[in-house]
Image (spheres, rainbow, N blue to C red):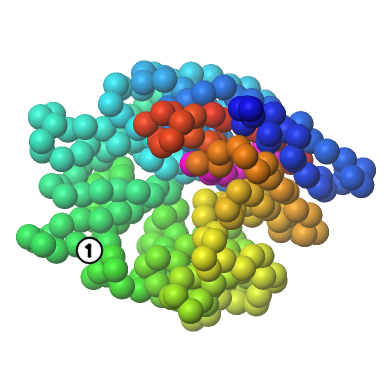
């Protein structure tokens, strides 16, 4: 018997809503299929590659969706507040590396990001993109670029060493926590920070913790231990809009920053959880699963209203 993921998710959903009646459940809605998982800015906008030449943008503040054209071969990488999308495209000619653009999805304007050979950008804020550069043969360093002007900043951080997480919205790339191991996730939504901490016996991040009042010297006051990680990694971590969400194994979990309510989407035994990812806005949690064995098969997308 083949169990459709949509049915598995819907029947196995447990959701506690702030301000809702105790025990209330929320419906998980299918958004159809796509070529990419959803990206969000944590508060208002979500975007995904609905087909090779179109992006679907969801504005949760106005409860509307619209399409934006997408150049064939380009893929969405990260989304910043204000619906600013970092998009990766093949260079021309294609053997010369990658090309990056910042697309304002509401105005459909495009900023070309001036790249150098070997650049790979993975994150975006309202001022900066961040990623890796190759200053010399065999060298890699963490780099930041003002995507409007092309000005670069680097703090000499090797990508395999501990690095300082930085605010990509701030003029001066303000530090948002002390240096953290490169493989440890740190996400912030002032005054809260969610961070992977500790190590298990195999050297893997052991916990996912929520802090308030993080500084450049410490992680502040721990508000909650959200999860034990380790062998089953905590992944796909998003904070913003009053909520933290993450994926652990076959579940999407979440916690409201005030009140501690939890969101839980459980993939039933016997159904594939391959490619499970999640992210959210202030109102909606977005869930993605592979349609087949891997990302080449595309994704099935779902949404649930948590507020």
Q: Which residues are magenta?
A: 275-286
Disc 1: CA contacts within 10 A as few (<14), some (14-19) or many (>=20): many
Left or right, residue 222 beside residue 101? right
Where in the figure is residue 130, as x and y percent of width and height? 33, 53
Given residues 59 and 90, the one toward you in this image is 90
Where in the figure is residue 158, as x and y percent of width and height? 25, 69
Observer able to see residue 193: no
Given residues 280 and 172, the one toward you in this image is 280
Q: Quarter-wise, where is residue 62 in the image?
A: top right
Left or right, residue 150 beside residue 167? left
Observer able to see residue 92: yes
Q: Which residue is mark 1?
A: 141
* Residue 279 magenta: yes
* Residue 215 magenta: no
Total label count? Answer: 1
Residue at image point 17% right, 33% down: 91
């Amino acid at each position: 018997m083949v169990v459709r993921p949509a049915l598995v998710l819907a029947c196995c959903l447990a959701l506690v809503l702030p301000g809702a009646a105790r025990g209330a459940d929320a419906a998980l809605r299918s958004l159809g299929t796509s070529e990419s998982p959803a990206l969000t800015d944590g508060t208002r906008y979500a975007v995904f590659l609905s087909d090779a030449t179109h992006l679907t943008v969801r504005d949760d503040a106005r409860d509307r969706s619209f399409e934006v054209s997408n150049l064939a071969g380009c893929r969405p990488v990260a989304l910043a507040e204000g619906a600013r999308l970092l998009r990766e495209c093949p260079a021309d000619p294609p053997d010369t590396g990658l090309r990056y653009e910042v697309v304002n999805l509401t105005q459909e304007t495009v900023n070309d990001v001036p790249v150098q050979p070997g650049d790979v950008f993975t994150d975006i804020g309202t001022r900066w993109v961040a990623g890796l550069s190759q200053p010399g043969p065999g060298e890699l360093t963490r780099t930041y670029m003002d995507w409007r002007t092309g000005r670069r900043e680097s703090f000499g951080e090797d990508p395999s060493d501990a690095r300082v997480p930085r605010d990509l919205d701030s003029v001066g790339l303000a530090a948002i926590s002390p240096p953290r191991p490169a493989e440890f996730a740190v996400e912030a939504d002032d005054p809260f920070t969610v961070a992977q901490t500790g190590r298990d016996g195999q050297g893997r991040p052991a916990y996912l913790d929520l802090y308030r009042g993080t500084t450049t010297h410490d992680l502040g006051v721990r508000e909650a231990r959200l999860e034990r990680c380790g062998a089953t990694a905590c992944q796909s971590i998003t904070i913003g809009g009053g909520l933290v969400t993450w994926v652990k194994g076959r579940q999407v979990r979440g916690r409201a920053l005030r009140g501690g309510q939890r969101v839980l989407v459980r993939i039933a035994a016997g159904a594939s959880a391959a490619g499970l990812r999640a992210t959210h806005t202030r109102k909606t949690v977005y869930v993605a699963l592979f349609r087949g064995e891997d990302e080449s098969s595309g994704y099935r997308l779902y949404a649930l209203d948590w507020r």
